[in-house]
Amino acid sequence: MDNVVYADCVLINGKVATVDAHFSFKRAIAVKQGWIINVGEDQEIQQHIGPQTQVIDLGGKLILPAAHDSHIHIGWLADSWHCLNCQDVRSLAVLRERLRDQAAHTPAGAWIRVCGLDPNAIKECAAEQRSLTRWDIDDVTADHPTLLALWDGHSCIVNSRALALSGLDASTPDPLGGHLGRTASGELDGNFIDLPALHLASGTMPRLTVAALKENLLAAQRLMNSEGYASYTEGAMGPGENTREVGAAGDRAIAAYRELQDEGKLTARVSIAFYSAERGVQSCATLKRDLDSFDFSQFTDRDWLDCRTIKLFCDGVPTSHTTWMNQDYADRPGYRGRSVFGGPEATEEAQVEALKQMILLAHQRGFQVAVHAVGDKAVKVTINSFVQAIQRYPGESRRHYVLHGSMGDRQDFVMAAKYGILLSEQPSPGGPAYDYEQRARYCGIKGEICKGLRDIIDLGVIIAGGSDGIMALVNWRKMVQAAVTRKSSSSGKVIRPELAISVADGVRMYTINAAYQEGKEAVRGSIEVGKVADFQVLDRDIFAVAHEEIGASRVVMTMVGGNVVFQD
């Protein structure tokens, strides 16, 4: 007993899912100065109890490593709480009534901002087989510039007042990589599709201050803590977001994180995926400019705030037919989409070369690269570009990863496994781009297999789990449930059950695999001696309940660095 170290805190009488190499279970944990000093049975851990030790009796509850969201947009998630939430709107009448009410409570001339709208779900538009347009909302928003941000984060609709403020009209050309909706006569109908168009739509909107962003980020971190997260990866933040709406993920947001770290106020660890673009348009020249001008040396704190990843986009989302496919869209014969690079006249070779050169630049400079690639063609081009960069500049693995790429072909994932390329996936149960059955309407058989992770895991690809949260759905247990059950959120049907994963696989995605994506598996992601004391306690055992109940489990306590940051 003379050599026993007294712990600051011990957690006993629990079911400890260590998520170690053997996925072993223990009963208790000892923590000293924010680090795990022992994991074992109750009797073994009780020897670490001294006169000042805090003892937490878990009452038999399941304790897991705290979750890491490998791809989320916290800046936008927090900003969504200041917008009119229209996720549940299914009719034009309801949308108009909400906008009319919002206008009555908004000073004349001030912006009205909507978030979460799914125009494909509006019954009048579906019945008439048409898009929602500015003329559907102009009369109830006449005194306010209005922007309806769609649920997918890649498109929006604005009213005529907003178009006039931005100086946009029929003569405005489509931006590179974006598309403006038009009538048959060429008049703008208010639809702005994909990121360059989004930036064009909101050019006159006031930007958030650093002080406001700090409040937003802290509120969002509290939400994340309440769902069991001790860390997350900001999916796209930097100068490429400066001109999008209120700049919730621009340079000021990075500055806000920096100030919060300096003030010791962060309650979750943050990794930033740096996004470079000029009004939503990516180029190698712009990336080089931003890499040269941004001071990455301020963001090397591996414990709380770092920035070592470059975010790129290869394509868009299936619901707007902006993903790059190898075959025709099921609902649009003769069209396969394209990348975000160049205009409509750009050749396939030119598009591939643009992405390849940006990846090569970031790789050569030592950065990890994360590429948004949804369509199977985009996945193939991205993985091939990664491989070429690795072959040209070999060395320590950067752990590059493909975002949202589960529609990729088998041979591409074989190549990914060979070269240590990861997949960052979000088996979210909501939204037509995430639902297996709904995506099949756009992408056919490829849509059915989306988020089908069993085969990809079996090929040896490490998959990190995320939420892609732009709004409030960050419950990682619901995402594990979706991947385990393969149930369509729209109909409840089980789609391609052979692609389902195990609960243990799902837990790994949001713990040790997510830590691996960040290059931090030596200190995070599992409950083992020598790792940080980041834990979450659930109200039920998700390894024992019916798979359909996993998502209903609640987090009752979250610890970050040995400190309780949430308790229910």
Image (spheres, rainbow, N blue to C red):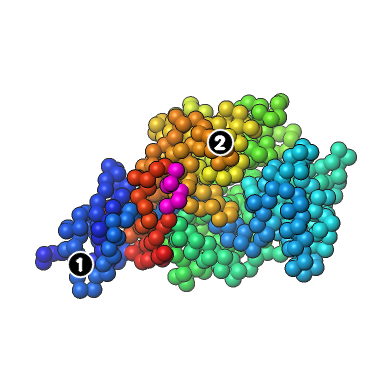
Circle 1 sits in a helix, a strand or a loop, which is it? Answer: loop
Residue 376 can be seen, yes or no: no
Residue flagged by tag 2: what amino acid is it? Tyr
Q: Residue at x 69, y 48 (%)?
A: 90
Is 190 situated left or right of 409 in this image?
Answer: right
Circle 2 sits in a helix, a strand or a loop, which is it? Answer: helix
Q: Which mark is residue 49?
A: 1
Characterize the magenta stretch by its predominant secondary structure.
helix
Q: Residue at x 55, y 55 (%)?
A: 472
How much space separates mark 1 and mark 2, taking CA atoms?
Answer: 50 Å
Q: Quadrant of the N terminus?
A: bottom left
Instruction: Give the percent coordinates (x, y) of residue 199.
Output: 71, 52
Q: Which residue, given by chain and number where applicable, does mark 2 sit on? A: 436
Span colored in magenta: 548-553
Instruction: Give the percent coordinates (x, y) of residue 153.
Output: 64, 49
Q: Does the magenta run of residues contain 39? A: no
Mark 2 Cα within 10 Å, few/some/many (few <14, many 20+)?
many
Instruction: Give the percent coordinates (x, y) of residue 549.
Output: 43, 46
